[in-house]
Image (cartoon, rainbow, N blue to C red):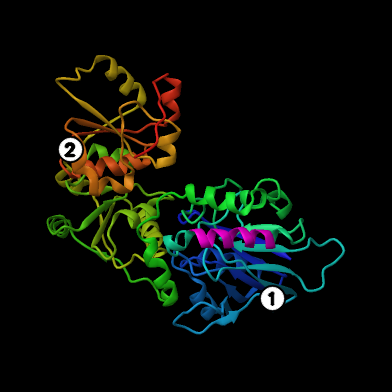
Amino acid sequence: MEIVAVEVPHLGNRCHLVHDGRRAIVVDPPRDTRAVEAAAERAQVEITAVADTHIHNDYVSGALGLARRHGADYLLSAGEQVDFERVGVRDGDVVPVGGLEVEVIATPGHTRHHQSFLVRPQQPGPHDAPGALLSGGSLLQGTVGRTDLVDPRLAADLAGMQWASAQVLAGLDPATRLLPTHGFGSFCASTSTCTRVGEIVTLADQHSANPALILDRETFVSELLAGFGPIPRYYRHMAPLNRAGAGRATPRAARPVTAAQVTDAVLGGSWIIDLRSRSAFADGHLAGSVSVEYGTQFATYVGWLVPWNDDIVVLSDTPDLLDAALRDLADIGIDDVATHVVSPGTAARALTASYRRADWTAFAVESDTADATAHPRVVVDVRQRDEWEAGHLPGAIHLPVQDVEVRADELPDGELWVHCRSGYRAGIASSLLHRHGRAVVHIDDAWERVAELQLPITTTVAA
């Protein structure tokens, strides 16, 4: 039995291809399945089964489309109500995949009908491991999947189910490999892990490290519910899309637009998303545009900030970068966007808005020399609640990046010095505040530098 983990960094997830050298099963593929299909081609195996551990809340599944292209069975809980035909599987079912067998284990918690898949050779040899557990959003590496995404009112009940499911999985052979989908950056996980692809994690490792297997049920539920962070706004649209089988359709093509049409879009209230580097954006950008620098978090923050179905125009100075960004957006159901490639001539004429960037050294120097009366300075911390509570600058205002657009008018007068942990989210927030007409300074520096410079830090609970 061979296992190929396919990282999906822009979703913070992993998809897995498990095969016997001839036939394979794919578990929890994203909408863009090219990477997993390339992995199957390299291994020279036929995809005969595709499975989703649950109806996903963080991305559009590619399982149905992948199964249909390869003539494979699509395995999904028989309890899920969907608008397409699939092979409905239940707890205890065993599905053959070539020389492998896939045992279905009901593990409700992350969602009501969540399942895990235990894959092992049908005739294991004396040196074969006991199998691999594809646990989806159930038992993760050092944590579990969130239980508040289906409906916050069900979070406590699902948390109790999540604990019980973890006990069931803990009863499997301790040498079983643990292969979750979430936990690598997705907001579907309670916390993130840093396990590298190829690193072997077993159930035995979780017995002394996973809160679901260490704490009693009541304590676990209480601590889990207390630790939940914010939910990206676009998550509420993912399950309906997946129940409708939206991932089987080819994403609608982008619509190239002219510079004049981009200007019209600004005036018409469209979201103009500039995916160039945050430093390039600060130096010169189109007035009214928003900086979301392309990277692994690009789609997450676009989906979080832009109201669903609002018109989007994506700007780039690199066509290849634009193509990658469009694929990432399609993976969360955002397609049919307008695009424009900024040429040097266009940049000189149109990218005339700008604001200042600084590091923590400049912040410290200006703290010593600034006249607070003549030039009031307002520090805006756009990190999440847990980061703020772990330590922040005295007098700073806590405004998480996802709330900037709706709460910008609450900020006091003065020059806004905006920071986060690395500078990425602060770049987004600075552009939003600048679009609101505020004078901003983007602190594009690592939070660790605050301690190095011995700037004062305090801890208070976020409002």
Q: Measure the C-alpha gap from mark 1 to mark 2.
A: 59 Å
Residue placed under numbered mark 2 in the picture = 438
Indicate the quadrant where residue 307 lies.
Answer: bottom left
Query: Residue drawn 15% across and 60% down?
Result: 261
Q: Which residues are magenta?
A: 156-168
Location of residue 51 in the rendering, given as x and y in whole percent from the top left corner: 58, 72
**In the rendered structure, does residue 270 fall within the stretch colored magenta?**
no
Q: Is residue 327 left or right of residue 399?
A: right
- Outermost residue on the front side: it is 218
**Which secondary structure dominates the residues rendered in magenta?**
helix
Kindly give the residue lying farthest to the bottom in the view shown: 85
Residue 425 lies, in percent from the top left, at 35, 42
Disc on res. 92:
1
Dividing the picture into quarters, in which one does residue 267 lie? bottom left
The kind of residue on which mark 2 rests is Arg
Q: Quadrant of the N terminus?
A: bottom right
- Determine the residue located farthest toward the top in the rendered image: 369
State the residue in front, 458 or 350: 458
Return the x and y of residue 238 as percentages of the image width and height: 41, 67
- Res. 26 in view: yes
Is 23 located above or below residue 321 in the figure?
below
User: On the picture, is 75 further left or further right than 226?
Assistant: right
- Identity of the amino acid at label 1? Gly
Few, some or many C-alpha atoms within 10 Å of disc 1 (few <14, some 14-19, many ≥20)?
Answer: few
Q: Earlier in the sequence, mark 1 or mark 2?
A: 1
**Numbered disc total:** 2
From the viewer's perspective, tell me whether residue 26 is left or right of residue 293. Answer: right
Question: Which residue is painted at 18% across and 57% down in the image?
Answer: 262
